[in-house]
Image (cartoon, rainbow, N blue to C red):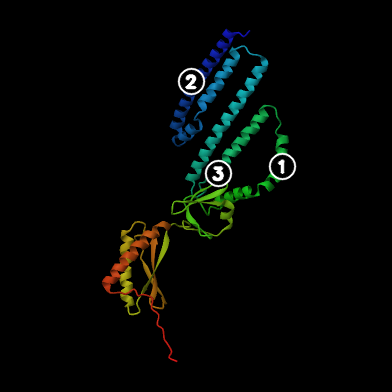
Amino acid sequence: MFDVRGIFFSLAVFLICNALGVIISKGILSKLNQMVANVLAEYSEVVSKALRGMPVIWGGILGSYSAMHIIEISAEWLRFLGGALIVIGVFSLTMVTARMLSEIVTIYARKAEGAFPSASILANIAEVLTYLTGTLILLQTFGISIAPILTALGVGGLAVALALQDTLSNLFSGLHILLSKQIKAGDYVKLSTGEEGNVVDISWRNTIIKALGNNLIIVPNQKIASTIITNYHMPDKELSVLVAVGVSYASNLEHVEKVTIEVAKEVMSEIAGSIENFEPVIRFHTFGDSSINFNVVLRVKEFVDQYLIKHEFIKRLHVRYNQEGIEIPFPIRTIHTKQV
């Protein structure tokens, strides 16, 4: 017959020990968070995120270990439970380390914007390496030699590389993009295939671009590494904007230039996104079919600012030309007919 009283006693001891372990663990980690916040305030949130949910796990380990030595159990069960606690403990420590490294890498990448771009691929690599190291430590703890495993991984690496050519190509292309520092999160880029927008992230497989229409464009890193890209944020975000204009052949070009410059200066001084101290420039370039054509050169702070600047400039220039009697001609074509 089962010893009901003994079972209830063992269960009660187990639950009490686990509850005490959780309480002690939470108290210790609370003090640890306070110490980190006092010494390294910027990393207190990193530690807090990394340790989230861990007090319960570590408290359970502590309580279970204590209960195992209070309750009378067989040596076989003692070894089994001890091994299980080791697995849970090593895995939880690995998880905390992976979380902390991921967050620290992300913080460092944001700080060192000029030295290394911010992208999730860095955090992902840090996490993968940490979990791999934790697995090897766990195997070594149980007396399993990792040398044959490493040898097998080396031999099988070629087969895996052949099977995952596209995946590995995207991974190493992503690393190349990061190390070259020619594209980083936040840059406005245009691909030779026509897609354009702000780079949101460079992951282990894709580069994510957010178009002006608020849609996401997912481009494999391999494509990014092999295509022609215009980066409108490098080497400087400031951008010259050309606005094409045409006036009648009967126009006084000196007067046209003066009026156009006045309107351009007005727009540059009043519209957000323009470079206020920039002197607009006019360059006549073509005797067209029905007009004398020229470009007005404006300057904006970044790529997306050009749309509002062009919008306001064209509106105001049209009103001013009407006031000054400057004609913007319709296309004209003269046809000569021959009488037979």
Q: Residue at x 36, y 57 (%)?
A: 273
Between 329 and 124, the residue placed more toward the observer is 329
Q: Is residue 172 above or below residue 135?
A: below
Mark with earlier residue (2, 1): 2
Q: Residue at x 57, y 16 (%)?
A: 66
Mark with earlier residue (3, 2): 2
Pointer 1 residue: 156
Local secondary structure at mark 3: helix
Q: Quadrant of residue 314?
A: bottom left
Q: Is residue 154 above or below residue 84?
A: below
Image coordinates of residue 119 in percent, x first then y, are 52, 46
Pointer 2 residue: 23
Local secondary structure at mark 2: helix
Mark with earlier residue (3, 1): 3
Q: Is residue 247 above or below residue 83?
A: below
Q: Residue at x 67, y 30 (%)?
A: 139
- Please name which of the two marks, 3 or 1, marks the residue nearer to the observer: 1
Find the distance from the CA under tag 3 to the CA under tag 2.
36 Å
Q: Residue at x 57, y 30 (%)?
A: 93
**Residue furthest out toward the bottom:** 340
Residue flagged by tag 2: what amino acid is it? Ile
